[in-house]
Image (cartoon, rainbow, N blue to C red):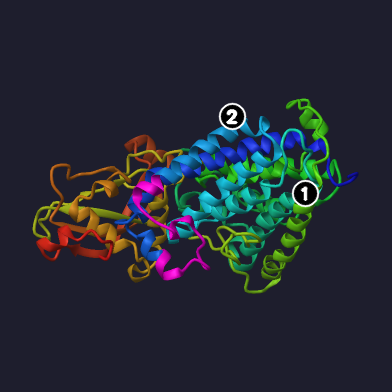
Amino acid sequence: MSGFYDSGYVPARLIFDRLLGLAYVVAFLSTLAQFRALCGARGLLPAPRHLRAAGFRRTPSLFHLHYSDRLAAAVATLGLALSVGVVLGVLDLVALPIAMVIRAVLWVLYLSFVNAGSVFYGFVWEMLLLEAGFLAIFLGNTATAPPIAVVLLLRWLLVRLEVGAGLIKVRNDRAWRDLTALCYHHETQPLPNRFSRHFHRLPKPIHRLEALGNHVAQLIVPFGLLCPQPIASVAAGIIVATQLWLMLSGNFAWLNLLTIALATMALDGRLLAAVVPAEPATDGPLWFAIMVTILTVSMIVLSWAPVRNMAARRQVMNRAFNPLYLGNTYGLFGRITRQRLELLIEGTDDQPGPAASWKAYEFKAKPGTLSRRPRQIAPYHLRLDWMMWFAALSPLQTQAWFPPLIARLLRGDAATLRLLATNPFPRQPPRYVRAVLYRYCFTTRAEHRRTGAWWTRRRIGEYLPPAALRSPADAANEDGND
């Protein structure tokens, strides 16, 4: 079918498949390590309870059929094995129907976790992985040239991602409009990395250039993706460079990785062929062309909602308009926090009071101990660390998972403690646990040279007063209804 396929995109598809597969690898790895404690049968927000309350139509998931922690681990392991196979090039060795089935199974498995994971799976990169993963089902295999319509749909997804994020910034926060947002962002972002302090200490004119560059990269450049070559390649190159800058300055799970993957689908095949040699592919069968046509029409229809949202004065950020996460609206950091608030969770065996000795639980990546250097975590995703950042900015009453977390620490729950970096009560749980709110700031260069500390902090007050188990019976209550 002349004009329906283009073998020039075979090198781009090879790169895209590997990067998408890598994103799936990280997503299933983090699920395997964290889902039980966060959303398992006795997790902080149990998946069975969430699925029963929401129903299958709102949260389609394999776990509506049956849920157990063992089954969830098996499903995540299967997803991990398939995604590792994709990274290793399995899709290059199988027939078109098998390649489509592998991609579809990955999508269904991860959709099942996202719809069962409530707020712990409500991040923008979960939505992006599902939408990109679904479109990838129709990219073809080694013998089949990529359909041009699917290539354009992947570019259109990237346009929505970037433009949606750009619009939400300039609409919602004056700091983005007056170009001062980056004076705060590197310090106040959810999980700073090892270079974030250095980025924060850059001169203010550089921060203004960063903000201006962000607006150009998100509000102007993306439209070049829909233009002929070489404009599309130039636009893709700018987006890739921007994402590499973001990867250097912070931890955003696999968001930057997936964005780069999408950008590769706009690169000129002649340019990529010199780096990724590939055999020319042929047109696909009629049934495949029909499926691609149906997909294209469906995605055009589903795009109406996010386009209308982007055009609206009261634009919403990161919203799925259907339970399959197709045709989403995207955005990030629509409002910049001006100061970094951190919650420290502490325990004691003493009676609460001025003389009590409190010991802090250390999380794997979020700031805690002042002398600990921020870590590079991305593309891995630490969901509890991220939620602690949101909790510090929100009233306790809005964080349904926080009281169960405190209860698990009072019980010494092993699965919950594995989500943390240190347990200051290794022999037995503390009698009391509290949460204290602090304001954190990066140290200056002089302070860092003098003390070795990466942070300074000032206590603001108690977020949660000292809490204890009400009775011995509470220690046996593991039904997730704390």
Position of residue 320 in the picture relative to residue 371 (left or right):
right
Q: Quadrant of the C terminus?
A: bottom left
Position of residue 289 in the picture relative to residue 468 (left or right):
right
Q: Nearer the viewer, residue 329 or 40?
A: 40
Residue, x 73% and y 27% (percent of image)?
276
Residue 185 in the image, given as x and y percentages of width and height: 52, 53
- Farthest residue in the right direction? 2
User: Tag count in the figure?
Assistant: 2
**Disc 2 residue type (three-letter):** Leu
Residue 347 vertical placement versus 90 (above, below): below
Q: Quadrant of the N terminus?
A: top right
Residue 428 in the image, given as x and y percentages of width and height: 13, 47
Decide whether residue 66 is among the magenta residues: yes
Residue, x 79% and y 41% (percent of image)?
233
Position of residue 142 in the picture relative to residue 170 (left or right):
right
- In the image, which is nearer the foreground, mark 2 or mark 1? 1
The residue range painted magenta reads: 51-73
Q: Are marks 2 and 1 in contact (CB under 8 Å)?
A: no
Q: Picture quarter containing residue 12?
A: top right
User: What kind of element bears circle 2?
Assistant: loop
Residue, x 70% and y 44% (percent of image)?
263
Can residue 60 be seen from the camera position used here?
A: yes
Residue 101 in the image, given as x and y percentages of width and height: 62, 44
User: What kind of element bears circle 1?
Assistant: helix
**Disc 1 residue type (three-letter):** Trp
Which one is earlier in the sequence, the residue at label 2 or at label 1? 2
Q: Which residue is mark 2?
A: 88
Q: Which residue is mark 1?
A: 287
Report, in whole angstroms, how far the alpha carbon at label 2 lies from the one at label 1.
28 Å
